[in-house]
């Protein structure tokens, strides 16, 4: 379906655009032609009538001066084209020709039609076709004072010829307009749709090749189509980012799981190769069980970190009391702290609220406290503080433990990184990575300052919620 | 006691069936959702273990259909999905408990037993005991032999939980859930620390140890 639709030219947008363009052009030029033709023929007809009427007036004046004799005398003395090109007739009451002059070399017409007309008005106009239908006669008839009729007419040959010429010129113009319209329209459509074709080709390539890093070329014009191409590129960029993130996450998880899985396998292999001893086997099986639990925990945590990092972690932010959450976290670790003789305190305003996913934030705080307790010697102290500063909510976990060497500081957030001194402690080396990933998924940030021998301060900065609303 | 297991993975189903039979239950196995639905409608079970991803009909729909037809068998959902959403969805559909794969069999057994007990037991006991260890739920007094033990509240909760499940393995996750009401594993040693403290108070001065650690599985309170 995808590859079929563009083959049918009749359905393409470009073709329809071209057709519409041409149709509008033809309609416009035809209208102009028809209007021009109508106006021209009207004005030519008016001119003809004027000429005929002028002739009629001349003949009537002669007739009134001296009757028929005067008329024919003047007429025979005339030497101009009027004599040649006009039909002049004077008839009596009984329609007997009293005087008649027919121009030479002109198509004849049926005189009897003239006799039949009823003269109601002082001047009557009549258009008669010639007998061979080649032209029309325009004839004016008037009643002379003595009751006779004066008829003057001329052929419309000149008029017809002019209009014919006009038809030809305008017809040619329309044909040229259509040709130019089609050509221009197709050129215009072609040019206007070029970015869309580029977009289609680009997207087709991305879809068929699966190369999501490919981009659609963007022209240097700030129009809608450029915007469209830019938006498509942005979307591709975003998709590519997500795909890259997922691929990276998958690679990382696969990589990080190899080591514990290798350990698991080695345990089983060594047990199988050792002499048959139930105690050894039991030991190996227990080791395997523990190792597989560790792999599982690692997988869960790595998935959490990866999801948080690429923005796939589902967060359900609500407004809640921060002091309550911190107190609960401290309570959970009460026994651990007591065992080590470490005093865990908090200095958090009772009414301080926070907008975040409480389960995820608890995970963050649990990891930070777990960390602080691990690296603080017996008899030490850990303190939670929190306050709002501008648009930020700042939570700090301060310990007076061993501290972190400055060269290690930037690396502590890395996955599976464990400092030299921390290797002795239990743990996966994922806690701080999870803290960073979850906080950043909340659009916040993490930080740490440390003084070797005197302790560290871990900072979590979250966007502060609306403080005006109650919990 | 009769338990229905609806699970399509043959190895896992065999492992669960065998374990439950060893624990003294009669077990029926169904490998598809539709068959499981029919079996649940036709027989009366005390509990059911239902996988979510099943051929023909998924576990959630199966539970919903049972509940719609007034089948009140306690159900434990098995799932490979670990998100809170799936857990909530499963429990809303009518499941009674939720266990994420991979799981330890002892945890599954403990949860099955807890469900059956919940549905059969009428009155709560006022005192629990094992050997010379006695725990009074009303006065909150704990005595080992003639020695009175002074327990903190968390220690008391843990001991009560272990006594209620005497002879059965409880995992760290289960302890976190029951003693702290904590729904997810924060990867801490909190449980170990609590167990260690309780052990010091309960077992240190006695020759017979009651709290045993099962590596990779959890803890068990038993006489031998």
Image: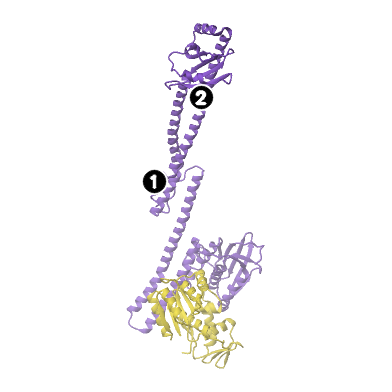
Would you identify the image quadrant in which residue A109 lies? top left
- Determine the secondary structure under disc 1: loop
The chain assigned the colour yellow in the figure is B
Q: Earlier in the sequence, mark 1 or mark 2?
A: 1
> Which residue is at a point 42% across and 21% down the rendered structure image?
A132
Q: Viewer-proximal residue, A80 or A87?
A: A87
Q: Viewer-proximal residue, A131 or A267?
A: A131
Q: Which residue is mark 2?
A: A41
Image location (x, y in percent) of residue A382: 59, 71
- Determine the secondary structure under disc 2: helix
Q: Is residue A317 left or right of residue B16?
A: right
> Which residue is at a point 47% across and 18% down the rendered structure image?
A111
The chain assigned the colour purple in the figure is A
- Residue extending farthest to the front is A94
Q: Which residue is mark 1?
A: A8
Q: Using the numbered discs, state the Cα–Cα distance from disc 1 to disc 2 in whole angstroms.
A: 46 Å
Relative vertical location of residue A76 with respect to residue A470 in this rendering, above or below: above
Relative vertical location of residue A394 with respect to residue B78 in this rendering, above or below: above
């Amino acid at each position: 379906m995808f590859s079929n639709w563009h083959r049918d030219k009749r359905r393409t947008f470009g073709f329809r655009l071209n057709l519409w363009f041409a149709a509008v052009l033809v309609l416009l030029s035809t209208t102009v032609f028809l209007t021009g033709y109508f106006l021209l023929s009207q004005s030519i007809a008016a001119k003809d009538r004027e000429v005929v009427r002028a002739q009629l007036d001349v003949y009537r004046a002669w007739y009134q001066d001296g009757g028929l004799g005067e008329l024919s005398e003047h007429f025979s003395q005339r030497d101009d084209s009027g004599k040649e090109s006009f039909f002049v007739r004077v008839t009596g009451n009984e329609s007997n020709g009293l005087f008649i002059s027919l121009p030479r070399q002109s198509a004849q017409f049926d005189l009897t039609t003239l006799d039949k007309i009823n003269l109601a008005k002082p001047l009557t106009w009549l258009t008669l076709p010639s007998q061979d239908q080649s032209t029309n006669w325009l004839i004016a008839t008037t009643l002379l004072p003595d009751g006779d009729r004066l008829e003057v007419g001329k052929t419309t040959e000149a008029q017809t010829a002019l209009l014919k010429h006009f038809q030809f010129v305008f017809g040619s113009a329309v044909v040229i307009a259509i040709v130019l319209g089609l050509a221009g329209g197709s050129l215009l459509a072609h040019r206007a749709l070029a970015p869309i074709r580029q977009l289609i080709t680009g997207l087709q390539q991305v879809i068929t090749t699966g190369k999501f890093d490919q981009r659609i070329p963007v022209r240097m014009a700030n129009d809608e189509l450029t915007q469209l191409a830019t938006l498509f590129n942005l979307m591709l960029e975003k998709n590519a980012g997500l795909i890259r993130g997922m691929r990276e996450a998958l690679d990382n998880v696969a990589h990080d799981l190899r080591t514990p899985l290798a350990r698991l396998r080695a345990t089983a292999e060594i047990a199988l190769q050792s002499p048959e001893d139930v105690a050894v086997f039991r030991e190996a099986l227990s080791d395997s069980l523990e190792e597989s639990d560790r792999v599982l925990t690692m997988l869960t945590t790595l998935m959490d970190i990866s999801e948080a990092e690429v923005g796939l972690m589902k967060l359900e932010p609500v407004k809640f009391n921060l002091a309550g959450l911190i107190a609960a976290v401290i309570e959970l670790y009460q026994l651990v702290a007591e065992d080590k003789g470490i005093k865990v305190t908090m200095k958090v305003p009772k009414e301080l609220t926070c907008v975040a996913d409480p389960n995820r934030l608890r995970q963050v705080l649990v990891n930070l406290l777990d960390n602080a307790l691990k690296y603080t010697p017996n008899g030490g102290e850990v303190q939670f503080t929190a306050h709002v500063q501008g648009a930020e909510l700042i939570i700090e976990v301060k310990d007076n433990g061993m501290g972190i060497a400055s060269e290690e500081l930037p690396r502590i957030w890395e996955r599976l990184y464990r400092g030299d001194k921390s290797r002795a402690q239990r743990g996966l080396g994922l806690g701080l990575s999870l803290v960073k990933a979850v906080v950043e998924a909340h659009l916040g940030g993490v930080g740490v300052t440390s003084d070797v021998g005197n302790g560290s301060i871990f900072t979590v900065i979250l966007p502060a919620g609306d403080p005006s609303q109650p919990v | 006691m009769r338990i229905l297991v609806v699970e399509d993975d043959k190895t896992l189903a065999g492992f669960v069936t065998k374990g439950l039979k060893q624990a003294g239950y009669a077990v029926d196995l169904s490998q598809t959702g539709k068959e499981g639905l029919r079996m649940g409608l036709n027989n009366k079970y005390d509990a059911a273990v239902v996988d979510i991803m099943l051929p023909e009909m998924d576990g959630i729909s199966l539970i919903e259909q049972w509940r719609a037809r007034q089948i009140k068998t306690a159900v434990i959902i098995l799932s490979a999905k670990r998100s809170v959403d799936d857990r909530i969805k499963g429990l809303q559909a009518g499941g009674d408990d939720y266990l994420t794969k991979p799981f330890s069999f002892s945890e599954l057994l403990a949860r099955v037993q807890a469900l059956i007990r919940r549905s059969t037991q009428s009155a709560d006991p006022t005192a629990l005991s094992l050997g010379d260890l006695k725990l009074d739920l009303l006065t909150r007094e704990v005595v080992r032999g003639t020695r009175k033990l002074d327990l903190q509240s968390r220690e008391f909760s843990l001991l009560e939980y272990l006594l209620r499940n005497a002879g059965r393995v409880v995992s760290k996750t289960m302890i976190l859930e029951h003693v702290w009401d904590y729904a997810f594993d924060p990867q801490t040693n909190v449980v170990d620390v609590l167990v260690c403290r309780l052990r010091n108070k309960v077992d240190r001065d006695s020759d017979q140890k009651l709290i045993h650690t099962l590596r990779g599985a959890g803890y068990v309170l038993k006489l031998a």
